[in-house]
Amino acid sequence: MFWYVILCILMLYPLSIVYAGNISGKRTQCVALMAACLILWFFMAMRSTEVGVDTKYYSHVFTQFSEIPFSKVFTAELYATEEADWIFNFEYGYRLYNKLISLFSNSPQAITVCNSSIIIVLLYYFIKKNSPIFLLSIWLYITLGIFQTEMNVTRNAIAILIVFHAFRYVKQKRIFSYVFSCIF
């Protein structure tokens, strides 16, 4: 709870940017959104592998990906713990994603940083394109479940934001583009 309160207090900074812009007559909503997203990214990406219910398991699996050859990326059994008593069965895309990141860094923190970066970029893009009040959207994002999504089920958060991004195709009545974006 302590860090959640700190995060909410830090969100006063982007709010002050918007407030200062309103006083001076300048549009500062995009700058405030960027500041809010950077604060969120820092909290999500720079956490320990022990923070979050399953972050330690994803980190352990990522370490295994860095050790297996490309030929076994889609078939290797991945264990959530060192005791090898719990098998993680990831989707093919997420397996490939882990292996590609492991080519750049073997650190278990790399997967957390990359996942957080994808989430924040998609969140920024989605809010900027679709929300009339950026900071309200950020506030709802935080209060409606940052600790339920980003700290626990990162893959779900990435998938949700990709689908949200692709939703614009439904509005344009381009269903094939929507399905294509969600699948790939």
Image: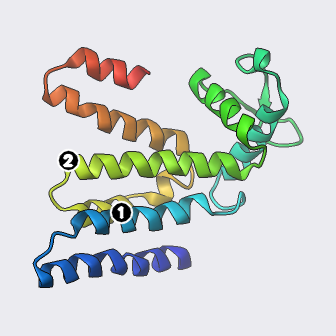
Q: Secondary structure at mark 2?
A: helix
Residue 34 is tagged as 1
Task: Give the crowd class for mark 2: few <14, some 14-19, many >=20 residues within 10 Å.
Answer: few
Is 127 drawn above or below residue 43 in the view shown? Answer: above
Left/right placement of residue 8 relative to residue 27 reads right
Is 182 drawn above or below residue 49 in the view shown? Answer: above
Can the viewer see residue 63 in this picture? yes
Left/right placement of residue 99 relative to residue 36 reads right
Foreground of the two, 104 or 62: 104
Q: Secondary structure at mark 1?
A: helix
Residue 130 is tagged as 2
Foreground of the two, 27 or 99: 27
**Residue at (31, 38) in percent of width and height:** 164
Q: Total label count?
A: 2
Determine the CA span between mark 1 and mark 2. Answer: 15 Å
The x, y position of residue 96, in whole percent, is 64, 25
Is 31 drawn above or below residue 104 in the view shown? Answer: below
**Residue at (57, 24) in percent of width and height:** 93
Q: Which image quarter is the C terminus in?
A: top left
**Residue at (14, 30) in percent of width and height:** 171
Labels 1 and 2: the sequence-earlier one: 1
* Amino acid type indicated by mark 1: Met
